[in-house]
């Protein structure tokens, strides 16, 4: 009897990765680029010196939506060990999603959306997202709901030349501080942009409608300062930056206090 195999998913950029000669591997249920022809070391160094472009569309994007910020923040504070109520509009923060016994189910980013009182955006890890969404949805009060954004893609542009590359495309990102978030136009494409990332470098994460992401990807790669970077260099960069990876450095046996100490 043959054991059924779960289908491997693809991001909207799968064809672009193959066209660039990427070595594709299964990761967190998706077929993802582990490296491009230049290799992991070259990609790592390029990101440190210029600007590296990562496809992280496999990650989970969603939002908690309630009648006002205080209500939504209180619902999220019952799930994570962080001050959500006092987060300013347009600001992002890192935290951990906790099990009922306090162990870490996942780490995540949350954002108080500017101009949308009662909406808190969430980004969770790809390997955990189905379980995360179920855990969160089961613990919300009746007046707060979970929205899951399956129609969004996510890019990370990381490195010292990332701001200049975005500004070349008309994106007004120079005003953003670390962990600021804003709605920005990139060559006429609306994007939800945060000044954050997972490499230890200055950089940005760009949430874009899936139907527009190939255009933005191609425009960024037209810039000689920008090169595509795979998951191999993403891992070496986060290790060098001292950033945790869920399932390796933190898991359900880790307390949030210890998990934060690793970051």
Image: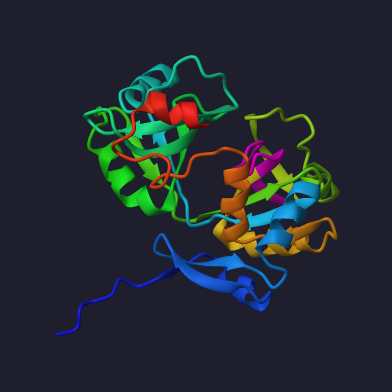
Q: Residue furthest top?
A: 86
For image coordinates 34% across by 40% down, the residue present is: 251
- Extreme bottom residue here? 1
Position above or below: 133 against 109: below
On screen, residue 54 versus residue 112, left or right, reads right
Q: Say whether residue 135 is magenta.
A: no
The image quadrant where one finds the N terminus is: bottom left
Measured along the vertical axis of the image, is residue 7 above or below residue 56? Answer: below
Is residue 193 covered in magenta?
Answer: yes
Residue at screen point 30% across, 71% down: 6
Instruction: Classify residue 160 as left or right of residue 13.
Output: right
Say above or below: 220 vs 26: above
Snapshot quadrant of residue 227:
bottom right
Q: Is residue 208 visible?
A: no
Which of the pair 236/24 is nearer the observer?
236
Q: Percent from the top left, x then y, of residue 67?
A: 38, 24
Q: Quadrant of residue 214?
A: bottom right
**How far from the left and from the top, in percent, is residue 205?**
63, 44
Residue 181 x, y percent position in the rendering: 63, 33
Residue plotted at (57% across, 22% down): 89
- The answer to whether residue 201 shows anywhere in this view is yes
174, 33: nearer the viewer = 33
Q: Which residues are magenta?
A: 189-204
């Amino acid at each position: 009897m043959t054991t059924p195999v779960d289908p491997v998913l693809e991001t909207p950029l799968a064809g672009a990765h193959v066209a660039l000669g990427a070595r594709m591997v299964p990761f967190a249920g998706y077929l993802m680029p582990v490296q491009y022809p230049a290799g992991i070391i070259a990609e790592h160094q390029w990101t440190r010196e210029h600007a590296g472009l990562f496809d992280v569309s496999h990650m989970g994007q969603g939002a908690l939506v309630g009648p006002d910020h205080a209500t939504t923040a209180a619902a999220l504070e019952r799930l994570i060990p962080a001050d959500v109520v006092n987060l300013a509009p347009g600001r992002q923060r890192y935290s951990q999603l906790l099990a009922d016994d306090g162990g870490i189910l996942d780490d995540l980013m949350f954002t108080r959306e500017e101009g949308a009182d009662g909406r808190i955006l969430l980004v969770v890890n790809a390997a955990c997202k189905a379980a995360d969404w179920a855990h969160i949805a089961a613990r919300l009060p009746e007046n707060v709901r979970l929205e899951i954004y399956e129609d969004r893609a996510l890019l990370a542009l990381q490195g010292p030349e990332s701001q200049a590359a975005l500004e070349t495309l008309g994106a007004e990102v120079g005003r953003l501080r670390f962990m600021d978030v804003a709605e920005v136009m990139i060559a006429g494409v609306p994007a939800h942009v945060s000044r954050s990332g997972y490499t230890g470098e200055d950089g940005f994460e760009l949430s874009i409608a899936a139907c527009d992401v190939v255009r933005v990807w191609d425009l960024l790669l037209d810039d000689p300062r920008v090169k595509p970077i795979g998951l191999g260099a993403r891992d070496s960069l986060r290790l060098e930056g001292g950033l945790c990876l869920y399932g390796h450095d933190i898991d359900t046996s880790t307390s949030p206090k210890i998990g934060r100490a690793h970051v």
